[in-house]
Image (cartoon, helix red, strand yellow):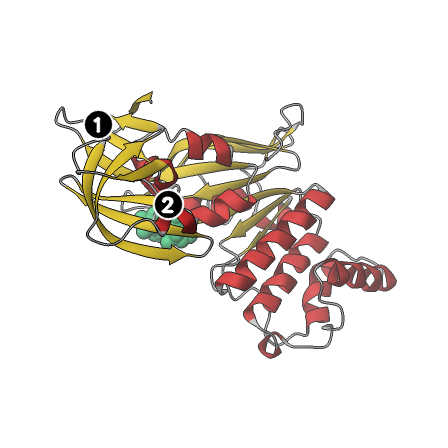
Amino acid sequence: MALMNMDKPTKLEIRNMTKLYKNGDGVRRINLSVMLGELVTLLGPSGCGKTTILRTVAGFLSCDSGEILIDGQNISPLPPEKRPTAMVFQSYNLWPHMTVYENMAFGLKLRKTPKQEIADRISWMLDLVKMSGFEKKFPGQMSGGQQQRIAIARSLLLEPQVLLLDEPFSALDAKIRSQMREELRKIQTDLAITVVFVTHDQEEAMALSDRIVVMNKGSIEQMGTPEEIYENPATRYIASFIGEMNFVEQRDGTTIAVRPENVTLQLGDGTGGDIGGIVRTIMMLGHFYEIAVGTEKGIVKAFVSAETAAQFNPGDQVNCFFDGTYRYQPDSDLTENG
Ligand SMILES: Nc1ncnc2c1ncn2[C@@H]1O[C@H](COP(=O)(O)OP(=O)(O)OP(=O)(O)O)[C@@H](O)[C@H]1O
Ligand SMILES: [Mg+2]
């Protein structure tokens, strides 16, 4: 369970911020508060405006209207280098002609940090990100995951008030990615850093965040803890974007939504339960099975244990029972939970 610290002070506040590009794309009326030490994720499909928000906070883009405050101070007029933020991008973060040490020391040198202190802090930070011994390597001599670790370490050395991470792990393979996720989470909570993290991967957002901000076409559609959003997706869009969901259209135009883990199957005549159908496929997905049932309203998926899966075969007639449903109106707003 993510802990919500409602009593913590607000670190970052985005107030009614709009930033539109010449072609009309961008973000509209963004309101978001991030508390001290909180990790908030901006989640949404490609083009929904995640990077645009990060860039306005970092100062690489100026907003058309609204304000951005850190510790209650309006930072909107400040250029990027005067802002207490640091940003890590998806890739190409390190200077290729500099060693790890030089990459990390650069920002501290600009700040006229004494040489010995630079050395001490780099050594401490490399230890923290489990990269001790890599001081003399060049970026081209390291894996993508190692480079991103150094990029994050370098930004942490500058002790930003707000760390902005724009899909920092998206170029990495699944296993390293989840490892990095865990490490980032540990460092972030240990050091109580305030982070805005961008991803279009809902699983990553669920695993990492104190709160998730789900975006749709330049606007915020829902905000809440991973549990809140998973258990109560406010719109059909959110329901389809977060976790697996079955949608069953009703005659009255509304849609019933049910998660595969809330579907149970019984062998039967195919007319009982909430909907009947025929087992199409049974797939092993790690520690559970997915049974896909073909119904008159389309495929309904059920997640079941290996034991349960063994009771069914493709071609079986089954009745599906829904436990815990959502109902969405045609205009997509949630009307009730069942
Ligand atoms: N410099 C630009 N000029 C014009 N339009 C832009 C510019 N940068 C982004 N856009 C548009 O603004 C919208 C938001 O872009 P943004 O990069 O913020 O999306 P994103 O959510 O980060 O997407 P992705 O997941 O693909 O990185 C998109 O429709 C995009 O095409
Ligand atoms: Mg982006």
Q: Distance between the residues labelled 1 and 2?
A: 29 Å
Q: In this view, does 240 lie above or below 232?
A: below
Q: Which residue lies furthest to the top in this view?
A: 336
**Residue depicted at 32% across the width and 30% down the height:** 235
Task: Classify 10 Å Cα crowding around label 1: few (below 14), some (14-19), many (20 and above).
Answer: few
- What kind of element bears circle 2? strand
Q: Which of marks 1 and 2 is nearer the N terminus?
A: 2
**Residue depicted at 27% across the width and 49% down the height:** 292
Q: Residue furthest bottom?
A: 141
Q: Residue 92 appears at what percent x and percent y?
A: 52, 66
Task: Classify 10 Å Cα crowding around label 2: few (below 14), some (14-19), many (20 and above).
Answer: many
Q: Residue 29 appears at what percent x and percent y?
A: 39, 30
Q: Is residue 116 visible?
A: yes
Q: In this view, does 300 lie above or below 148?
A: above
Pick the front one: 208 or 258: 258
* Occupied quadrant, residue 338: top left
| Three-letter code, disc 2 | Phe
Q: Left or right of 167: which side holds 71?
A: right
Pick the front one: 127 or 312: 312
Residue under pointer 1: 331
Pick the front one: 45 or 77: 45
Quadrant position of the N terminus in the picture: top right
Residue under pointer 2: 303
Q: Residue 268 appears at what percent x and percent y?
A: 21, 38
| Three-letter code, disc 1 | Asp
Q: Left or right of 123: which side holds 22?
A: left
